[in-house]
Amino acid sequence: PDVVNKIAAGEIIVAPVHALKELLENAVDAGSTSLEILVKDGGLKLLQITDNGCGIQKDDLAILCERHTTSKITMFEDLSSIATYGFRGEALASISHIAHLTVTTKTKDSAVAWRAHYLDGRLVPPKPGQPAEPKGVAGRPGTQITVEDLFFNIPTRRRAFRSPADEFNKIIDMVGRYAIHCEGVGFTCKKAGESSSNLSIASAATTTDRIRQIYGSSVANELITLKSEDDRWGFKAQGLVTNANYHIKKTTLLLFINHRSVESTHFKKAIEQTYNTYLPKGGHPFVYLSLEIDPARVDVNVHPTKREVHFLNEDEIIQAVCRQIEEELAAVDT
Ligand code: ADP
Ligand code: MG
């Protein structure tokens, strides 16, 4: 059965960045205002994320990496109202099937932090012969998740990663996206053993500051604020998009739906078309867009391996947002 779980997990988490994205979302969901990320060998050797969020109760540690635990099933009774999609309570479980997972966590009511090790969905001893139960350790409130030797049991996958540098770039890109989206949260990301961070965003930084730090002033100096909503389609959108003074060879689209970074080919195409008449030939925009859609309208049944998102009235919502962009571009233009 663990072979089946391993294969399923390997299909969900194809690259280190996919594990990292889930850990980022969990840390943000926990109400953290500071996230520290440490990476070794492009995340294949080590992915560690330390947050200062609510922490996990000691009693929940035993079932943390189980798929569909009782508490999770109750939570998921109303499938159509899950605000998130994709893993549905399976991220940590999946990771535990293809890596060595260590969780150290402290809630603010707990006198100590608790550390637990996982493999294949279950608590395991830190070393053979030691007890598998969580161990009390010193620590600050919050959670630290350590993922070591990702894909250690899928050697063909592991060998397929030719360049840790490429994997690290994907990780930095993803952290940057969440850093731009999560105002009020500080982020650092660095390679293990290095003293300086590759990304460091103060919790007080504004969204524009964050974009400036990550994408540069050429983007940050040319941003227009976007706001759009329509009750008919049950959505609210807000964002920052470049005006006609800015253009680059490839579109940068930072798209968040219900606070999850997602991909949407439809959305990207429509945005590119909208900018077409305003930018020189071959020029493309930077677009950061955050959409809140009634969760019941987002397709939660899309298979977790699909990074593309779909939602009800997709065409109408995309059109409405693009019309808003068009209006803003036209207004700045004249
Ligand atoms: P899901 O996020 O879909 O519930 P996960 O496997 O990602 O499934 O996480 C399982 C649960 O573990 C979460 O619902 C949350 O209660 C808890 N959890 C995971 N990461 C953290 C964290 N960093 N801080 C606090 N709780 C966490
Ligand atoms: Mg999660």
Image (tube, rainbow, N blue to C red):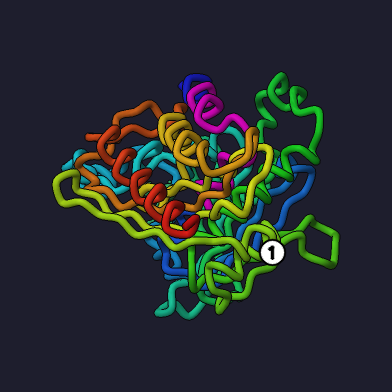
Instruction: Judge whether residue 27 is colored magenta.
Output: no
Q: Viewed as shown, does residue 146 lie left or right of 271?
A: right
Q: Badge 1, how many Cα within 10 Å: few under 14, some, many 20+?
A: few
Q: Position of residue 221 (x, y in %)?
A: 62, 65
Q: Nearer the viewer, residue 78 or 319?
A: 319
The residue lying at 34 percent from left, 45 percent from top is 323
| Secondary structure found at label 1 | helix
Residue extending furthest right? 194
State which quadrant residue 157 falls in.
top right
Residue extending furthest front? 334
Residue extending furthest left? 232
The residue lying at 40 percent from left, 38 percent from top is 87
Q: Which residue is mark 1?
A: 217
Q: Nearer the viewer, residue 327 or 39?
A: 327
Q: Viewed as shown, does residue 175 lie left or right of 189?
A: left
Residue 299 visible in the snapshot: no
Prevailing secondary structure of the magenta residues: helix
Residue 319 visible in the snapshot: yes
The residue lying at 43 percent from left, 31 percent from top is 308
The residue lying at 39 percent from left, 65 percent from top is 57
| Badge 1 residue CB within 8 Å of ligand 1 | no
Q: Nearer the viewer, residue 247 or 50?
A: 247
Q: Position of residue 213 (x, y in %)?
A: 68, 65
Instruction: Judge whether residue 15 is colored magenta.
Output: yes
Residue 284 lies, with reference to residue 40, above or below; the image says above
Q: Viewed as shown, does residue 27 lie left or right of 222?
A: left
Which three-letter amino acid code belongs to the residue tagged 1?
Ser
Q: Position of residue 53 (x, y in %)?
A: 47, 70
Q: Position of residue 129 (x, y in %)?
A: 64, 47
Q: Viewed as shown, does residue 233 lie left or right of 281?
A: left
- Residues rendered magenta in the picture: 6-24
